[in-house]
Image (tube, rainbow, N blue to C red):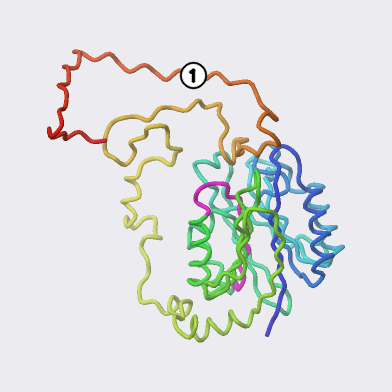
Amino acid sequence: MTPFAIAGVQMYVNALQPNVDGMIHRLDILMARFPWTQMVLFSELAPFGPLDRFALPPENETIEVFQAAARKHRVWLIPGSMFLKHPEDGRVYNTSVVINPEGEVVRRYAKMFPFRPYEAGVAAGNEFCIFDVPNVGRFGLSICYDMWFPETTRQLTSQGVEVLLHPVLTGTTDRDAELAIARATAAQFQCYIFDVNGLGAGGVGKSCVVDPTSMVLHQSAGQEDMFPIEIDLNMVRRQRETGMKGLGQLLKSFRDRSTDFPIYDRESGADAYLNTLGPLEIPQQGTRAGLHVDVPGQQVPAELPAYKGKNGFPPEPLASPTAGTAPEVAQSPAPAAPAAATPNPPTPPVTVGQNDNTSG
């Protein structure tokens, strides 16, 4: 048996003020309650929330605070992620750091798949994150939307990753789909998955831990939660050799495949269909995209905030029905419909029993 104890921290995240002190406070409580914890993972963008206007330089005092905390508690620490701005070209990346028990930053990872078109203005990383915990095993890191693309986990597990650390910020209605993807990914790639979401501006919670058989070892609800789970890396190795529950040996089957996939060759033309799908953009009110009718959607004023990226964030719960009430914002009137060339003829009344072929 190769045991290793990893704790996820699902906490309330503010959008308009730093959460770093709260993270350190929760880490102190976690280690006082569960001193056997060896690695701690927070949710995506936990330190400063989802506003990219709070982007920091790659080297900053906040990372140093987390380094000191890791060194103090002798734990591996992944403090979620934060927006970091490239000092030369100014591009903003959603970046995680991996800190070892000596307080050293051993890896940095920039999210490969920003949640476009909603995370507009956030640049995509192009390097994978893999690191070894000595005498334990190999770990990989991806962020939120990355997991929706199985190629990311395929790359990690093909290089020996046994535990996938996955901080997320999901406050939308697709959280249940993400939980299904987490279970499927664990089974497909025969690995443990620690999927940690936030609360408030940091998400709707429902963090989970999944083992290589797709069994859910822990499922958080919608309140703050600390969940240390001891995993067994020998279980991963056993199942990769003998198959999940003695059945599918997926990684070896992929290794021994008789087919290569031209879809990954951008010059092959095999992905021509994808070029028919239209631009990657936020749907507008009344959009008819994909319905093959030439009716534009109603445009939303450009000054309204987006979700993540472009300084956008989801609304936070108020302390009372009137707390934080802001004046109403005048909305731009919708463009008037063009005048018809001729008036529509009157529609005869429909009587009971008369066929009505109009759609609802």
Q: Which quadrant, please, contains the C terminus?
A: top left
Apparent side of residue 334 relative to residue 106 in the rendered image (left or right): left
97 up-or-down from 101: above or below: above
Which residue occupies 59% across, 41% down? 308
Magenta residues? 161-175
The residue at the point 59 percent across, 43 percent down is 122
Count of numbered labels shown in the rendering: 1
Q: Amino acid at mark 1?
A: Ser
> Quick check: 316 left or right of 345?
right
Residue 253: x, y in percent?
A: 43, 79
Side (left or right) of 160 relative to 292 = right
Which residue is more in the foreground, 128 or 174? 174
- The rendered magenta stretch, by its main secondary structure, is classed as loop
268 part of magenta stretch: no
Dot 1, how many residues are within 10 Å of its Cα: few (below 14), some (14-19), or many (20+)? Answer: few
Q: Position of residue 225 (x, y in %)?
A: 70, 58
Residue furthest to the left in view is: 354
Which residue in the protein does label 1 denote? 332
* Position in image of residue 156 (x %, y %): 56, 67
Q: Position of residue 87 (x, y in %)?
A: 70, 42
